[in-house]
Structures are given as C-alpha cells and as structure tokens.
Amino acid sequence: MCFSSRSRLALTGLILLLLAGALPAQEALDLAQPAAPPTWQPPDLAALPTDWWQQFDNAADVPLEQRFEQLNGALRDAVSQLDGEQLLTGQTLLQAIRTQFELLRLALTEPVTEPFGTVPVRDEYTLEQFLDLRQEASELENRLSVPRLRIDELKHQSELVRARRDSLLLQYQGADINTPERLLTGLRLIEARLVSELIIADAERLEQRIEQIESRQGQINQRLEYARDHLVADPAYTTELNADFEDALTQYQELTDTVASVQRQLLENLSKPQTRPSLLVLRKQQLTRASAAQALARLTILKLEAERIWQRQRVASAEAGRLDEAKLREAQVFISETLGQIETWTAASRTTLLSPAPADSLNAVKNMELAQAAAQETLRYLEDAERTIDDLEVLTDLITVQQIGMQHGLRSIWTRLRLFAEDIGHTLAGYLAITLFHISDVPVTFGSILTMLLILVLGWGISWFIRHLVERLKSRRQFASSPVVYTLSRLLHYIIIFIAVLAAFGSIGLDFSNFALIAGALSVGIGFGLQSVVNNFVSGLILLFEGSLRVGDYIELDTGLRGIVKEINTRATVVRTNDSIDVVVPNSQFVTTQLTNWTLREPLARFRIEFGVAYGSDKEAVRMAALKAASRVDYIVHNMPSRPVEVWLTNYGESALVFQLLAWVSKAGVRRPERVRSSVLWELETQLREHGIEIPFPQRDLHLRSGFLENPNDARAGDAAPAARPADAKPV
C-alpha cells in the first residue's frame, strides 16, 4: 500500500494521540495497585552505596532497633574477616558506631520537655510576687543563650563532619574492592554519617527547647504587664521587709569589718618581701570576694529600702514620697559605681580561676585552691548583685511612676505658680519698654538693647560652632592639610559677625539708608588711625584666597624668623618656632616682604651641607663616607632614583677640598633644618674619622725675618732683597 507524505504525517499524528490517551490510563492502573512496602537490607561494605542512609531511614516498617541490629550484624561479619591490627581497628570502629547510634536513638525518641510549671493567674499581685515573675523572666532570657550558642557550635561541627565525609568518600572510592582498607574506610563513612545525623537531631532538639522557653517567656511577659497594673500593698509583707532590712544592716556591718580585716592582712603580706606569690593571690582574691559580698549586701539594703518606699507610698501622702527621693538618688549613684566595679571584680576572679597551679610547695598549691574557690564564690556574688541591680532599677521605675500619679494633686499649685510667672512677665515687659534715649527720632529702650546684645551673642555663638565643626573636620586625615577648609571657616566667621552686627544695630531702629554718612565717617577714621588695621585685614584676606600661606606650612621670613603657621587671624598670623615660641606677625609683612614657604607645594626639599677635607684625601673614600653618613640620618629620603643623595666637589679652598652633600629631606626634616644639618654633620664627622680622612685646620704660610734694622736706608735695602739670616742668630 502506498501512502503519500501527507497521509503518512496524518497517520503518525493519530498514533501519537492514541498513545497520549493511553498514558493516563496506565498511570491510573499503576496507582490502583498497592505499593510495595519498603524493605531494608544492610549495605555491603565492599560496595557501599551513597544513599545507604536514606534506605536505612526510610524503612519505617522495620523498627529502628531491628534495623540497627541488622546493620551491626552485617558490619560485624565484615570485620570478622580482618586480622591483626586491622581487626582491632575494625572492632574499635564498631564500638564507636554503636555508641553514636545509641546517642542518636535517644535524640530521636526521647521527648523534649522543659520543667515548667503553670503560670499563676491572680487578680492582684503583691510586690514580692511581681519581682518573682521578673526574676523568672530574667532566668528564661539567660536560659535562651545556652541553646543558641550550642546551635552555633553544632553548625560549625556539621561543616567539619561534612568535610570529613567528603574526604572519606574520596578515599573509599579510590580504594580497591574487597580490601581491608576499603572495609575500614566504609566503617569510618558510616560512623561519620551517624555523627552528622546526631548533630542534626541535637540541633532540632535545641530548636524545640528554644521554642518552649520562648513560649514560656511570652506567658511570663504577659503576666508581668498585667501584674504591673494590678499591684497592691501587703501589710504582712511590710513587716517581713522591716525584719529583713534589719538583718541586712547587721550583715553589711559584719562584711565591712571583714573587708577591713582582709585589707590589713594584704598590706601586712605586701610589706614582707618573703611572702609567697600564691599567698598574695589568695589575699587579693579574698579581698575581692569580701568587697563583692559587701556590695551585694549594700544593694540588698537599697532594694529592701526601695520596696519599703513603694509600700509606704501606696498608703502615704505625696510629701512622704518627696522625702524618699534622696534615698532613690543614693541608690542610683551606688548602682552606677557598682556596675563598674563588677566588671573589674569579674575579670580578676576569672584570671584567678585560669591561673596555673604552682608546683613549688604544698602550701602554694593549697593557697591557689583556696583562691580559686574564693573566685568561684565571688562570681556567684556578682551574679546575685546583677540581679539585685535589675530589681532595683525596676523598683525605681515603679516608684517614679507612682510619684507622678501622686503629683496630680499638685496641679492647683502649679496653676498658681504659672499665673504668678505671667504677672512677673507683664511687669518685666513694662520695664523693658522704658525709653532710655533717642537716636534721631528712634527711641532706644531696655528691650532693644537686650535684643541687640542677644543678637551679637547669638552671632558669636554660631560662628564659634561653625569653627568648632571645621576643627573637627580638620582632625580627619583627608582634610588635615586642606587650605580650603580653613579659608572657608575664616570667611564664614567674618560674614556671620558682619551680619550679626548689622542685625544688632538694626534691632534698635537704626536706618542704614543714610549709609553714605557712616561710610564717610569710617573713611576719615581709617585715614587717621585705622590704616594699619585695615591693611593687615586686607592682607589676611589676600593670604586666605591666594593660598600662598596655609595653616601648617613651614615658612621663613627675610627677618630670619622660621616656624610653623598656627593661625591666620584678622590682623596677624601666629607663627610657632621650633623652640615652641609663638610669634605674632602682622599680615602685611607676608604680602610686602619676601616670604619663603618651604612646604607650599613640594613636601620635600634638597639640603646642601658643605664640608672640607684635607688636600690629598681620597675623593672616592670621601664620597663613600658622606653617603654612609647620609644613610644614617632619618630625615633624609632614601631609595628614590629620581632624587638621589649626591656628593659634589665644589671648590679648592685655602685649606681644604670643599665638598657638598646634596640630600632630599622629608617634610618633617624640612621643618627642622638645624636638627637635620646637625645630624648630618655629626654623622659626617664620625664617618670621616672611621675612614681616616682628615678634617684640616685653617692654614697660613708664615715668613719670619731675622736681624734688626738700624736706619731707614737699611730698611729700604731690606725691601729690595731679603737679608740672609746670620748663622749665630738666636730667637729672642
């Protein structure tokens, strides 16, 4: 039968449609049949599959104990084929696997239950019951920190175990089949997998604990909110508080005596040179323990006192509450002091606990054991102190809220005070409106003068604040040497002061429309007495805008003054010399005279230090000595090919060969030229002496003539030709 191409395509499409319709029916048939129950077969260590744990874990129809016994039996049979040390290693791994499985079984089967009781539900709460609820809330918060830290540790352990599993898997796949090495590696793989599953199970149990603790915490916090609004005073509890207060006072006095006694013992031990170090550690820790116990007793007294205050204010008047404010302030001050001491005591106690035991004598060991026991007791005292401080802060808040409620009865007094203040205000307003004098037709009053002064003070304050911000900005490294920042600060200062002056005089009613008269008066004043002041002011502006002089530059004037620019003010600039002497220089001198700015744009400068050596000295030796001397000076820049240290022969002097050492000096050295020159000359002298090069003295040729001239003719004859020295001439 022959089909066309179109017929063949149609037939193919029909077959595909029939198959597509048959597939869902086949799927329904498969679903109608019951699924085969999963089975568990122990893995073969010679060919351990990668999904053996999934097979083990999914076989829910076989009890967990039975699955493990089957697995353990298969592993035991495989290990029995080993011998020697490999057999011992295999048995050790089997024991580790059994231990890990027992831990895993407990983690999977035992329920996670926190021993929480029921939260009491009451219509009213006493102060004691409220504090007990807060104590439980604080304990719950501390309990949450432990499982959270443990979860973080388990995450880290899980990463390590996963890396170990990957490494063991590579070893297992690389080992030959049916070899002892492959068998032992398989056992290690199974153990690592059990450890990994145990970590996961422990993390899940910890998460369940956290959920239970957080649920309990929510219940306690809810009851706390209710209890805070339904607190009542309990007369019986007041009687108990009074008894506890007296006992606390007695205990505090005893602890005070104990602290003094321990202090005396410590001072006596410190005064004896032969005292063992372990005994000193013991005495210091005993003093810390006694001080912590004393602080706890004092906090307990303050807490009991705060509870008594609260109880008393519930039934007393507002006046009684005001009498207790001093005690509350005392408690707050002592809390602040104690919090700082707690950190110190905690650090000292932990240091004692971590100190190694001495091995020199039994007494030293005993002293260290006693010190560590005292440290543990100190830490318990400090924990109780922190809880007491927490209760004290809560009590202070309760008392404050209670006092605010009691002060509602004082609103009438406040109203009277407000009305009295308004009367005083009206009276002062009348006095401020009194006219003192007139400027033209404008009256000047007390109020306008006060306003003018206030504007001037405000303008000065704004200027000071801006300059303070600029100084903070300059302290940052990226702006430390920026001249723009300083120029901007000075310019803003002048502008703000100028605006403040105009606003101040405008506040008293001065009209600046007739400014020509004022300008003419200023011109006359400038012409006679203020010429130098204006000159310096304009010079200061020129320096700021040109940037030829900046704060921090090292400068030199033609007068010889050298130093660092510290301030550029309105009239003068402050220059601090290397001797820390501040010299005030008028700004006009920087504009009209020659100024050398050593650090304007280039931080480095080249110094020329001239020195001389004796004629006949080796020039290369001189050069090497000079370069070595330069290398020993810190301010000289080294290892810069573009700016090397050089030695030049510059002149033939009368007594010496004149050399110059040319060296580039850092910014710090540029600011200390004399120190740099002195350091270079110092090292030069040392190196020239070590190289045996002479530094010559000044030399002169001296010609001596002998005999005496008896007449002028002989003198003229002597000028013509030098006379010969007689053989018998003797020095006079």
Image (tube, helix red, strand yellow):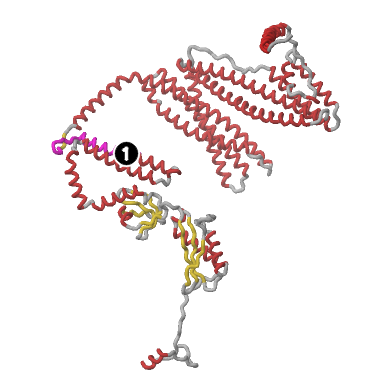
x 75%, y 27%: residue: 189
Kind of residue at disc 1: Gly
Q: Nearer the viewer, residue 84 or 107?
A: 84
> 364 left or right of 617?
right
Does any portion of residue 16 appear in the rendered image?
no
Q: Is residue 704 above or below residue 386?
A: below
Q: Nearer the viewer, residue 246 or 300?
A: 300
Q: Residue furthest left?
A: 441
> 440 left or right of 425?
left
**Residue 252 inside the magenta-drawn segment:** no
Q: Position of residue 557 (x, y in %)?
A: 36, 58
Q: Is residue 379 above or below residue 616?
A: above
Q: Position of residue 11 (x, y in %)?
A: 69, 9
- Residue under pointer 1: 461
Structural crowding at the residue carrying mark 1, measured as other residues with C-alpha within 10 Å and reported as few (<14), some (14–19) or many (≥20): some
The quarter of the displayed image where residue 397 is located: top left
Q: Position of residue 73 (x, y in %)?
A: 81, 21
What SS does tag 1 mark?
Answer: helix
Which region is colored magenta?
438-465
- Dominant SS of magenta comes to helix
Q: Is residue 38 above or below residue 165?
A: above
Q: Which image quarter holds the N terminus? A: top right
**Residue 439 inside the magenta-drawn segment:** yes
Q: Position of residue 440 (x, y in %)?
A: 14, 38
Q: Nearer the viewer, residue 188 or 368?
A: 188
The quarter of the displayed image where residue 480 is located: top left
Q: How many marks?
A: 1
Q: Nearer the viewer, residue 254 or 8?
A: 8
Does any portion of residue 479 appear in the rendered image?
yes
Q: Which image quarter holds the C terminus? A: bottom left
The quarter of the displayed image where residue 412 is located: top left
